[in-house]
Image: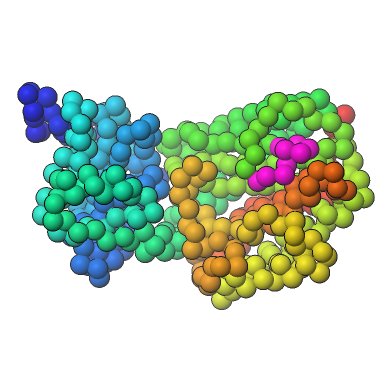
Amino acid sequence: MKTTSLRPEFFELHNGSKSPLPFSTGEYDRRLTALRQLMASKGLRAVLLTSMHNIAYYSGFLYCSFGRPYACIVTETECTTISANIDLGQPWRRSYGDNLIYTDWQRDNYWRAVAHVMPNADIVGIEGDHFTLASHSKLKTFHANLKTNDISSEIMSLRMMKSEEEINLIRGGALIADIGGEAIRDAIRSGVREIDVAMAGRDAMELAIAEHYPDSEIRDTWVWFQSGINTDGAHNPVTTRQLKKGDILSLNTFPMISGYYTALERTLFLDDVDPASLKIWQANVDAHTLGLSLIKPGMSCAEICSQLNEHFAAQDLLQYRTFGYGHSFGILSHYYGREAGLELREDIDTVLEPNMVVSMEPMLTIPEGQQGAGGYREHDILVVTETGSENITGFPFGPEHNVISGS
């Protein structure tokens, strides 16, 4: 423990015993070995990770910042999380490796703790897509001659290839997303508010996580249930709008298990669907079915996007596409994490390989005032295999399944 005026700048505290982590010791060793191989290839003495997703990926600890900085420092032999005193012993219990707690008795104790963990480093890897200019300036204050190397793209690529343990957790998350979808479908009625339906889905998923993953942290699971005009955006928040007959509905369930996000998204209609809406819906369903067939090793993200664009263009609907056709899954969420190198977009040339996990999620949005107005979206999660892909989403899609009686 280092002190100033009898108050510590940082200290260690092993309060209680280690909690079960999401993955085995062997899995964390595998990840750290791959990172250290990257470090060796770039001549790095340490890596300073600062994002929620990378800290959790390498240590198991998912922090809650609340305006405070956190870190995971990986050296040639050690893996140490740096956490704020407000969390006390929880970061150590939830970390693979060591933990150092910094206090707020004086400003910049975080950076003093960082300097303590890597005193001999002359060049350190950072996440350039997360490490701010202010952080870089502070780091230089405590390590005047330290050089930094942005390795954010390289460690993103490491995360894109999933282990069997990760795939098993993602598969379990997809199953729980389906459970949430079923609860939402059962809660849909005329006159019910979006928030009431969303809560039914969220509660069902949290109960399922508590049952199937009792050692995990129960937090961050959410639902976006949208109706009518609120379906126009994929990330529109839940409101108190009441459902009415003929509404287009968008079901979106997102269970979170130890930082790993999965998703189910479906278009539905309440009681009946008009001919114009049915035509748009079916076109999007057909795109979804085509997209599912394209997820296989050897296909590039851009090539998949191109074929789906041709499908919509042939029906004069391409101008209503609002975003790419899918993305990677793993340790990510709506407020942290992204594996941008594995998104199904025109500007991404990544080629699919076995053990990648991606979604297929075409969406069309028809503006208000036009026939068939609303947002149409289907979403499945697929594990790329040696010969094709495994669809791990089970909730049915399409008009024959999802016109819901609201009486």
- Please indicate whether residue 405 sits to the left or right of residue 155 in the image: right
Q: Is residue 260 visible?
A: no
Q: Where's residue 100, x and y in %?
A: 20, 38
Q: Position of residue 383 (x, y in %)?
A: 56, 61
- Residue 229 in the magenta stretch? The answer is yes
Scheme by which the image is coloured: rainbow
Q: Residue furthest bottom?
A: 298
Judging depth in this view, the residue of 320 and 27 nearest the camera is 320
Instruction: Tell me the quarter of the image containing the N terminus.
Output: top left
Q: Is residue 358 above or below residue 95?
A: below
Residue sitting at x 68%, y 29%: 239
Residue 119 horizontal side relative to residue 359, left or right: left
Task: State the residue at coordinates (86%, 47%).
Answer: 370
Return the x and y of residue 159 as percentages of the image width and height: 42, 59
Q: Is residue 278 visible?
A: yes
Residue 295 is left or right of residue 81, and the answer is right
- Image: magenta residue range: 226-234
Front-most of 70 and 25?
70
User: Which residue appears at 83% of the width and 65% of the height?
Assistant: 315
